[in-house]
Image: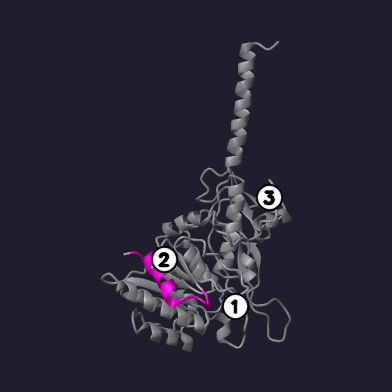
């Protein structure tokens, strides 16, 4: 026979066990420590980072922001973006290291490919030790793609003791890797990333005396050379002409004075010069330093895009990540190219255009987004 005192004792023990289990669950944190698509750029890194954040949310766990290190195929490092989401909350146990290009005439990995090795010196008090397989189950990828109702409860990753400076109450941190999938759907995570971007206190692009600032990303990339890799990402001359026409109409609608900055990975290209000349007819256009290297200015270019009153994007993921993080107006092409893009059309601060769009109609939308 159970006495009232014994029943109370059992209830207390059950509550204590439940509370302990809840505490253990909340103390398990997640982060992303993958190879960022083996040499992809900033957008590729964010796709994988976003998937890891979605998994953490599904698990009801805290997500720790790692150092953002996109490894561009054209450049040896992307460390200028390390704190683009504020000070990193977790230092991964290993880091992506770029291999030297193979010698001429010798078969090997393509430049930009790399391997993982332990971080020398150690920025953490304890190194992570692999406690699970290094890759997530296929069900996670299916879930991220919308083909499965939910990911598995147990997510594979590298379990590490929480020793990072920003880990707080995390008892264990699971370092998710590239096998955990990627996602370009930021509808549930955008506010999280925007908030962290603001913490980094980016240098704002501001006008003078009431000017409206406009930052335009003109992507040429590999298409300004003999190769045609990623041609679907480039800004076409037709799109550049549309952008100039839309902005001219928007300036006339509200009597606005635009201050425009054109950022590009190919500043010296003739098409960039043509766009600058077209814009100069109705706007103050900042000089374009054709000799400036892309890597040296990439972070400043990104912050200009993300903080301008109006950011103008083509097909490049670099610009679309900036558009994702801004709370100001966005003008972006919706023309399909077959390339996966950060979706923007559903966001309330975006004016979209394609080949069939009326410049005046799109300009009216832009005018409305910019406000008085």
Look at the image and give the residue range highlighted in magenta.
354-371
Q: Is residue 300 visible?
A: no
Report which residue position mark 3 lands on.
Answer: 149
Quadrant position of the C terminus in the picture: bottom left
Closer to the camera in the image, 5 or 254: 254
Closer to the camera in the image, 83 or 22: 22
Is the Cβ of the residue at disc 2 closer than 8 Å to that at disc 1? no
Specify whether 195 is left or right of 145. left
Q: Earlier in the sequence, mark 3 or mark 2?
A: 3
Mark 3–mark 2 Cα distance, whole angstroms, equals 34 Å
Is the Cβ of the residue at disc 3 closer than 8 Å to that at disc 1? no
Closer to the camera in the image, 42 or 119: 42
On screen, residue 339 above or below 61: below
- What secondary structure is marked by label 1? helix
Identity of the residue drawn at 46% across and 65% down: 350
Q: Image quarter for residue 15?
A: top right
**Within the magenta stretch, is there residue 357?**
yes
How many marks the image carries: the answer is 3
Quadrant position of the N terminus in the picture: top right
Specify whether 320 is left or right of 136. left
Q: Is residue 11 visible?
A: yes
Mark 2–mark 1 Cα distance, whole angstroms, equals 24 Å
Closer to the camera in the image, 357 or 237: 357
Report which residue position mark 2 lands on.
Answer: 329
Counting from the top left corner in percent of width and height, residue 49 is at: 58, 59
Report which residue position mark 1 lands on.
Answer: 232
Q: Residues within 10 Å of mark 2 (few under 14, many from 20)?
A: many
**Within the magenta stretch, is there residue 36?**
no
Q: Residues within 10 Å of mark 3 (few under 14, many from 20)?
A: few
Q: Main secondary structure of the magenta part?
A: helix
Counting from the top left corner in percent of width and height, residue 192 is at: 49, 54
Is the Cβ of the residue at disc 3 closer than 8 Å to that at disc 2? no
């Amino acid at each position: 026979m159970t006495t009232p005192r014994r029943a109370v004792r059992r209830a207390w023990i059950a509550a204590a066990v439940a509370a302990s289990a809840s505490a253990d669950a909340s103390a398990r944190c997640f982060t992303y420590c993958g190879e960022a698509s083996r040499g992809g750029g900033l957008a590729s890194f964010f796709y994988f980072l976003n998937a890891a954040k979605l998994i953490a949310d599904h698990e009801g766990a805290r997500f720790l922001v790692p150092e953002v290190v996109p490894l561009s195929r054209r450049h040896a490092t992307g460390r200028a973006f390390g704190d683009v989401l504020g000070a990193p909350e977790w230092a991964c146990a290993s880091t992506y290291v770029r291999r030297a290009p193979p010698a001429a005439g010798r078969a090997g990995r393509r430049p930009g490919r790399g391997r993982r090795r332990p971080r020398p010196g150690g920025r953490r008090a304890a190194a992570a030790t692999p406690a699970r397989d290094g890759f997530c189950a296929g069900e996670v990828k299916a879930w991220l793609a919308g083909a499965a109702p939910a990911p598995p409860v147990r997510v594979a990753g590298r379990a590490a003791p929480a020793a990072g400076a920003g880990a707080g109450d995390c008892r264990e941190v699971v370092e998710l890797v590239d096998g955990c999938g990627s996602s370009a759907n930021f509808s549930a995570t955008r506010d999280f990333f925007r908030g962290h971007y603001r913490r980094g206190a980016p240098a704002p692009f501001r006008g003078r005396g009431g000017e409206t600032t406009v930052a335009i990303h003109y992507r040429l990339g590999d298409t300004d050379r003999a190769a045609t890799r990623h041609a679907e990402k480039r800004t076409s001359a037709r799109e550049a002409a549309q952008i100039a026409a839309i902005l001219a109409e928007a300036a006339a609608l509200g009597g606005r004075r635009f201050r425009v900055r054109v950022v590009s990975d190919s500043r010296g290209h003739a098409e960039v010069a043509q766009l600058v000349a077209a814009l100069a007819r109705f706007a103050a256009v900042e000089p374009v330093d054709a000799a400036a290297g892309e890597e040296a200015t990439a972070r400043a270019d990104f912050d200009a895009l993300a903080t301008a009153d109006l950011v103008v994007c083509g097909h490049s993921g670099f610009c679309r990540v900036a558009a994702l993080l801004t709370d100001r107006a966005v003008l972006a092409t919706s023309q399909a190219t077959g390339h996966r893009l950060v979706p923007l059309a559903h966001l309330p601060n975006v004016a979209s255009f394609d080949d069939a769009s009326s410049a005046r109609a799109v300009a009216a939308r832009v005018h409305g987004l910019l406000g008085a």
